[in-house]
Image (tube, rainbow, N blue to C red):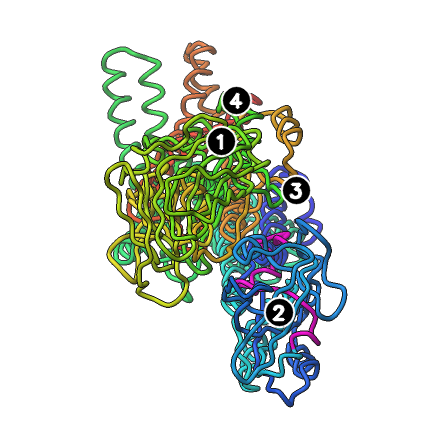
Amino acid sequence: MLGLVIGALRARRVQALVMLALAAVTVVAAAVAARAADTAGERAARARVAAATVTERTLRVRGTVTTGDRPEEVLRRMGNLVDAPVDEKSGGLRLAGDLVDGDGNHRQAADLRSAEKLCANVTLRQGRCVGADGEAIIPEELARLLGVGVGGTIVHATGLTAQPVSLDVVGIYAPADPAGWFWAGQEGTAAFTTTPTVTAAKATVTATFDAVLEPEAFDDAAGLKSNLDRLRAARFEVTSGAAGLADAVAADRRSVHRSVGLAEAQILLVGGLAIAVAAAYAAQERRGDAARLAIRGLPRWRIRAATAGQSLLPLALGAIWSPRLFAAGFVIVAAADWSATRGGVTELMRDVRPRRPLAAATAELCALGLAAAALFQIAAAPAADVRRDTGFGLAQVAPLLVAAGLGVLGTRVLLAAAGLYGRHALAAGRLSGALAGLTLGRRRTAYRIVPLLAAATCVLALAAQDWHGGATARAERARVELGAERVLRVAPVARERLLAAVRAADPGGREAMAVVVTGAAGAPPVIAVDAARLRAVAGVDGSALHPAAPAPLAFTGTDLSLRATGDGNKLRVLLAADGTGEQAVAEFGPLSAGPDPYPAVVPGCAHGCRVEAVEADRGTVELRELSAGGTTVIGAGMFADPARWRTTVAQASAGIQVVQAGGVLRIGDAEPRARRPVDSRLYVVDAPVPLPALATGDAAASETHDQPAASIFGASVPLDPSSTALVPRGGGNGILVDLEYAARITAVAVGAVPSAERPEVWLAAGAGDAVIAKLRAAGLDITGSDSVEAATARADRLAPSVAALGDLAGAGIVLLLAAVAAFVVAAVDRRDRDAEQAALRRQGVPQQLMRRVERRDALAPVLVAVVLGLAAAVLLRILAPPPVRAFSDAWPVQAPAVQATALVCAGLAALVVFGAVVIARVGRR
């Protein structure tokens, strides 16, 4: 019997090879999908951790250390309780209180802190890092507010029971990476020193332990949560987004596994259908073999074994690694062989195969019923994310079912229409049309492949649309979140210096734009931009952010003269150098009762300065005129103009009252509404207040009063917001303001607290390396860069993109399996077509005409299947969104339901593949 089967396989090598290929491709594709699920899930998880924010990856632990405790023991205990892989860590102490300058004239609320790895995470503007007990470094803004520099002395005072700690200022610092892990746990204003210096206050302090977790720490969400619970049970305060990130990583893994699993299911289902088609047509070819074996008197079971074995042997070889697929294939082959060879010898010897309309109608009704059920499930829950659904309903395989149902209906309609057209063409004498129509109407068996081809086309079209839509959305999000085509990270630099450097490097304002990202911790980010360049660089209209404002009170010269009167007090004019923003102070007085001129020398204004504010000691002063080198800078009329002066806008209470009349500006004392901080400065109005802004949603809403406000460079600035859906860099949660105006408003504001600032330079598309070289030549230290292309590539490694790509790969395998099935149909149908062609040639039908008709007949099922598959894809996308969102968070995706480009490309791909298969068979006749 085995020799008989092998001999038959040699005679029908094409059919055997096709069955072997179908089984092997199905098994290998399913096995690869199963293995790829683990690999893809792991890569997506690692990409999710790499894309996480510092808050999500950082673990911050806080605990109280009383006077009698040993801080090092508490810190050691914290570290021991963190039972997770740690990448970076820093322990330290902090003590709340006030810093007072050596003369006791200035006091600012600030912590005294110690921290491991401090010196590696600061940029020293002046001096050096802490090297011994009693030494401290302070931030630039705090040094300005206290009026001290390197070499000065400050005192940290905590309360009545604590001892004041004297500190020698050895350095002025700025955060090396304000957005990095170290500074994420160092909110607020602080002076940094050594641990023994902090404990010298003999007060209760707070122990801090900050750690960046390794990616492996997020693999076990339950273990990580248990670790956090143990820390809290030990009476430590724990702040971390690690638990949420671990849950997101686990969800991403599940999403990828489920998506790849569904692709595997589609491959197995289509592979099974393709095997069924191949087995059915191969069984029809073996009807003669069964008849001859029956004539020789072989038992029925041996006849079945001899005929079915011709499909089962290559099936077993192809599915050798998948017993389940072989078992399913065995049932399919046995059923197909039984259906084809169950008649008697007379029936088996007939060339015309018997029709079984009841069986065909039953199969078609089942296909239509399943398609209707799948559509009902989708319509009932159109927004369901089937990739995250715990069940497995018909909606998961809706593309196959709906397209197959449309294929059944379309085939019925086409066959009837083709027969009707052929009869009319024959009556009208159109031979070519008559042959094409009548042949199409009679080839019912060839059209049984249409539902399978339509299903494969639908799967490919949906996968291509989902992938294309997701890729487009990810590129758009990367462009919004990054802000511009390319972003350069800049080392800490003064805002005015950043503006001047960028404007000098790109005078035309078409390629580069200065940006500073700031904002309070936990609040929407504030993106301060050079608004005049916003449209050219980021494609956003920024004209509303920079309306006309009073001109700055600018001058050039070092010799100043002020005509004023006073009560023996002194008056200071606060200045900012052009191009650098460096602060300078011109001090006048003591002022007498007469309006005499008082001189002051300011070397820092040799290249130009602007007046920012004036402040006086307690008492009353009257200002009349300020001149520089004999040129009037502020005349009597400007001093008396209420539109040119304002009081505080920061977190402070005004400590002055202002009277402007008769060409005189009078500043007197006023009782502040709060004790501290008190702002006794009078500021120049050279920027609009409230500050114009573009804000998303309620990003600019204030919890304390009706006036919208935001923390900009540490100062609370009132805003005049315009609503928008998205802002560059902030996306759906951010505020956009003009950098120049924001810097002027907050430059010397009392009550401003040091805040994280990230200076950047945004580059427009097409900006070359020459601009970067000019930026470096202008004095900017570029520490890194990012681009839309790189951000998109990072997003493409996340779970939604991996899932969509897996769907697309699975759809490609499905298309290949359907093409092999189409090859089987074309090969089996070849014998009948050859006989028909020979008969028509003998009747005088031209060869060229026969070729045209034959190509039309071969391509007709393909065209019908592709059109129906695309129609099913359009219907499914109209009824329901993609099963996997482009993002795992709630980022809004504005995309059309039908991606026309992807749909057309998928249709062309299916048409080319299927058409090439059937035309190749025609060309070989």
Q: What residue is disc 4 on?
A: 507
Earlier sequence position, callout 4 versus callout 3: 4
Q: Residues within 10 Å of mark 1 (few under 14, many from 20)?
A: some
Question: Could you tell me residue 134's position as x and y percent?
Answer: 71, 70
Magenta-drawn segment? 173-198
Q: Which tag is nearer the camera, tag 1 or tag 3?
A: 3
Residue identified by numbered label 2: 113
- The residue identified by callout 1 is 909
The answer to whether any part of residue 408 appears in the image is: no
Q: Residue at x 29, y 27 (%)?
A: 418
Specify few, some or many for label 2: CA neighbours under 10 Å numbering under 14, 14-19, or 20 or more. Answer: many
Q: Is residue 158 magenta?
A: no
Q: Is residue 918 left or right of residue 626?
A: right
Q: CA distance from mark 4 to mark 2?
A: 44 Å
The disc label shown at residue 783, or none: 3
Q: Nearer the viewer, mark 4 or mark 3?
A: 4
> What's the CA distance linking mark 4 and mark 1?
49 Å
Q: Are marks 3 and 2 in contact (CB under 8 Å)?
A: no
Q: Quadrant of residue 899?
A: top left
For mark 3, give the secondary structure.
strand
Q: Position of residue 902 (x, y in %)?
A: 43, 34
Give neighbour class at mark 3: few <14, some 14-19, many 20+ (Cα, 10 Å).
few
Quarter that holds the C terminus: top right
Q: Amino acid at mark 4?
A: Pro
What's the amino acid at mark 1? Ala
Q: Position of residue 475 (x, y in %)?
A: 48, 39
* Picture quadrant where residue 215 is located: bottom right
- Does residue 137 lie above or below 238 as drawn? above
| Among the two numbered marks 4 and 2 on one chain, the one whose residue lies closer to the N terminus | 2
Q: Earlier in the sequence, mark 3 or mark 2?
A: 2
